[in-house]
Amino acid sequence: MTYERDATTLELPWAFTGREDELELVRRSLTSFRHGIVVTGPAGGGKTRLVTEAIRGTDCARAAGTPESRSIPFAPFAHLLPDSVTLHRAVQVLSGVRTLLVDDAHLLDDASAALVHQLAVHGRTRLLVVATDGFPVPGAISRLWTGELLPRLALEPLPEEETAALLTAGAGPLDALTANRLRRLCQGDLRLLRDLLGSVRGLLTPVPDTGERAWRGPVPLTPAVRERTAPVLGRTGPLERDILDRLAFAEPLPPDLDELGGLGGLDLGDLEVLESDGLIEVDDEGAVRLAHPLYGPVLRAAAGRLRARRLARTPDVYAAALDAEAAALAHRIEQADVRATATPVGEWLVAEGGPLPGGYAAVRARFARLRGEVREAAAWAREGLRGHPGDASCRAELDRAEATTGSPAGPDLDPQALTDPYDAVRLGAPEKVIDRLGGVFARHADALTRADGPDLDEAAAELERRGFLLFAAEAYAQAVRAHRDPRAARHSRTRAVALARRCQGARTSALSGLVLGELTARQRQIVTLAAAGLTNRQIAERLTLSVRTVGNHLYSAYARLGTSDRGALPWPARTPEAQPA
């Protein structure tokens, strides 16, 4: 017997994280006044987990379509119906079921699809219907929402901050480059994310002085990874496979393939075939890339040493590509536009553990910091210092990133001592530097000088459009204090909080106390004490609560604040009194 051994190796599902609004929407659909809901979304996006969480603790029958049963009438409902049954009789039997979950409804046979549709028409059974985007859906199922029998929830990919919380729950704190890499490779597929994280958990290495761990190296070729990349791995035509492999080691290919020298001579006809099959993409400038971020790493991992050695770029080519990427980032910074831009060579090198020039790492760190990605900025600076411990530019960027994630109190907040004049605006002293600024930064300074709430909102919106998410959050926070209209102030607060959540735990003077305003009074008490270093038991004793109640309040607060642990909680402006909430 092997049951005991096998049981010890089974992995339990991750804790349900995020999607509070969607969860509440699904739960409301099961109230006495509603008849259910249809949930659609991409494969692996968490649809089934969402509805399973919504019905936890309730009496719910379940059925699921499968590819193998698409030609067998009523096969998904065989465990709920008599051996031989008509559609009319099936509707009668299942009308006595209070709640019915139908998973993978896009795989239902026609009879089962008709059954679900008739149950929705009769309205006696509350239906939770789950279908995956990108697959043909039986007409009887699509008419559930097009015919307005049931509302439809189109599930979007899990937001970045909630994915980060999920990764932390699955593997502990990860450095920002590792978290970004996992998100980029999985493209919202949470099943693939779990598989990939499980396969690299043993490869994680500590990042000095941070408490985080990092993954560098090739992508493991797990069965799930091979399944997702079968379209490229299974391409056996020698010319097409050669193009895919060359792209894996040298993407993006420039518009003029003759510029590639040794990589030139590719057949445009084969490129067109690969593009039509969705394996490669051509951007507006004509550059050619692989269509999915996972394709390149997997093709490189599967190439073998000799083929990889032949296809890999030489150091001088790498250096030239990195210089070009650094120049492009620097130009974007000069133009006050830090919206995301493709930098495949640097990301590839750092992901697989290659050395980075200090100058390149410093530019990447600065670009990330200006975008509000402060943990990512620190990670890029550390990568530069790993190969060049004495690099002053990387050290300066690391110091600035770490200062942004620490307490806002300190000498660096003295406007007279700041090297960047715009920092004085962020600190609320625009009159000292307004004549030294231009563009959107000058508009921000002018609006703050006049305490003009609407103009601060406009400056914040422009900063957000240009990619300066942290600066935009700060401008909206300043607008909250400047507005005379309470409704306008609430709007500014909402925008500030939403943007601050995307800034990887940034803690600045302008944001001080802002996020705590999103919590209930009791949550604010508990969060402030937790941020001050008290354990759950200490908080429970201080507020005369149970430890379990404290844990529940913290869990809810984590979800609202877009974080997953004490280290990313807002710092306390002052210790709250232990008054009843």
Image (spheres, grey):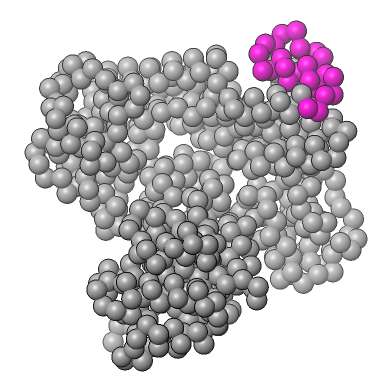
Find the residue positioned furthest to the top.
Answer: 435
Q: Which residues are magenta?
A: 428-454
Q: Position of residue 297 (x, y in %)?
A: 29, 41
Number of disc labels? 0
Q: Position of residue 173 (x, y in %)?
A: 53, 50
Q: Residue at x 23, y 23 (%)?
A: 314
Tell me which corner region of the image, top left, top right, bottom left or bottom right, holds residue 257: top left
Q: In the rendered view, would you say 205 is above or below 71?
A: above
Q: Residue at x 67, y 50 (%)?
A: 561
Q: Residue at x 71, y 25 (%)?
A: 458
Check if residue 446 falls in the magenta segment.
Answer: yes
Q: The N terminus is located in which quarter?
A: bottom left
Tell me which corner region of the image, top left, top right, bottom left or bottom right, holds residue 553: bottom right
Q: Position of residue 513 (x, y in %)?
A: 79, 42
Q: Residue at x 26, y 49 (%)?
A: 229
Q: In the rendered view, would you say 317 is above or below 476?
A: above
Tell me which corner region of the image, top left, top right, bottom left or bottom right, holds residue 296: top left
Q: Position of residue 384 (x, y in %)?
A: 46, 27
Q: Nearer the viewer, residue 364 or 203?
A: 364
Q: The C terminus is located in which quarter?
A: bottom right
Q: Nearer the viewer, residue 438 or 455?
A: 455
Q: Nearer the viewer, residue 309 or 98?
A: 98
Q: Is residue 108 visible?
A: yes
Q: Is residue 365 visible?
A: no
Check if residue 84 falls in the magenta segment.
Answer: no
In the figure, is residue 260 to the left or right of 138? Answer: left
In the figure, is residue 478 to the left or right of 37? Answer: right
Secondary structure of the magenta portion, mostly?
helix
